[in-house]
Image (cartoon, grey):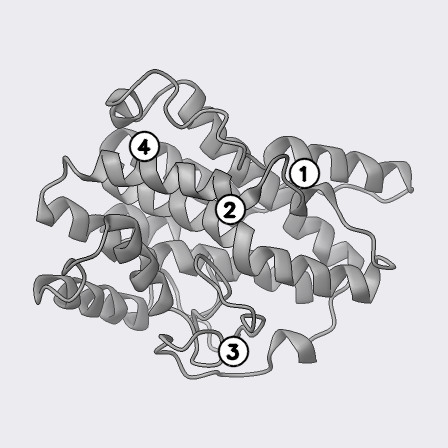
Amino acid sequence: MALAAATLASSPRVSISVSAAGMNSSGLSMSFGARRVPGISVQIHSQRRRMAAAAARGHEGAGKTFVEEMRAAAMRMHTKDQASEGEKELEGPSLNELEPNLEAYLRFLVDSKLIFQTLENIVDRAAVPCYLCLSDAEFQNTGLERSEALKKDLKWFSEQGHTIPEPSASDTKYASYLEELSEKDQQAFFCHFYNMYFGQSAGGRLTGKKIADKILNKKELEFYKWEGTLSELLQNVRTKLNQVASSWTREEKNRCLEETVTSFAYSVDRLRKIFT
């Protein structure tokens, strides 16, 4: 996809192995490849082809809801030590072996706020017509929203005397990419929506706890708290996603699943900021 190739030009790493949607309790490892490749790498193109081939063979859809298909696609991007369904080999150190630093973590939080705010803005103005397929404000106020929580966390860091950086160039491009997808490729947009929110609820929480233990004196940030019962909030969104996807053709569903590779590429780039 030309748009993805253009917007991923600043993503510096190739290896794509990171905690995300559907993570199990051991999902704290992530792999950072050292090789720089301009644009979308050959590896990413190859992974997209394999994702499409698996869907074409019917491995994805047999007896599964579409959200389960999305989870299966996400599991392909995990290492085997993260999840039993993982297909990636761990390359490089795990999260337990890496040392975060506060300045880098602030960059990660700022970029995360930008991306979650972008997703929420798109939903709020109903740029994606399918948001109106079932009822008004179908994906608004789900309880999974994260931008306000991040705003509070960044305000707290500022009050402690820390300088809050501007969003990075790479995630500014990612935000623009999401805006374009919401208007031109709705199935692909839903892939990013799913992986961002469900990933934060799973591997994101575990990552946050590890970082809090190491550099925040165990302080739990608002980013990792939800009002209400998280499992119920997630199930409500699963139901809505499945309802929207029920009107898609198989080709449209496959398009959504293929986008998992690009979604993970951006997630890895953002998480890498914590340790650089």
The residue pinned by badge 2 equals: 231
The quadrant in which the C terminus is found is: bottom right
Q: Secondary structure at mark 2?
A: helix
Q: Is residue 180 left or right of residue 36?
A: left
- Amino acid type assigned to the residue bearing label 4 in the image: Ser
Label located before the other in sequence (1 or 3): 3
Mark 2 burial class by Cα count in 10 Å: few <14, some 14-19, many 20+ = few
Q: Position of residue 164 (x, y in %)?
A: 76, 41
* Up/down of 93 relative to 204, above or below: below
Mark 1 burial class by Cα count in 10 Å: few <14, some 14-19, many 20+ = many
Q: Are marks 4 and 2 in contact (CB under 8 Å)?
A: no
The residue pinned by badge 4 equals: 182
Q: Is residue 108 left or right of residue 9?
A: right
Q: What's the residue at 10%, 48% (across, down)?
A: 251
Tell me, yes or no, if residue 185 can be seen here.
no
Label located before the other in sequence (4 or 2): 4
Q: What's the residue at 73%, 62% (across, down)?
A: 211
Front of the two marks 1 and 2: 2
The residue pinned by badge 3 equals: 34
Give the quarter of the image for residue 263: bottom left
- Amino acid type assigned to the residue bearing label 2 in the image: Ser
The residue pinned by badge 1 equals: 150
Q: Are marks 2 and 3 in contact (CB under 8 Å)?
A: no
Q: What's the residue at 83%, 38% (across, down)?
A: 156
Distance between mark 1 and mark 3 Cα atoms: 30 Å
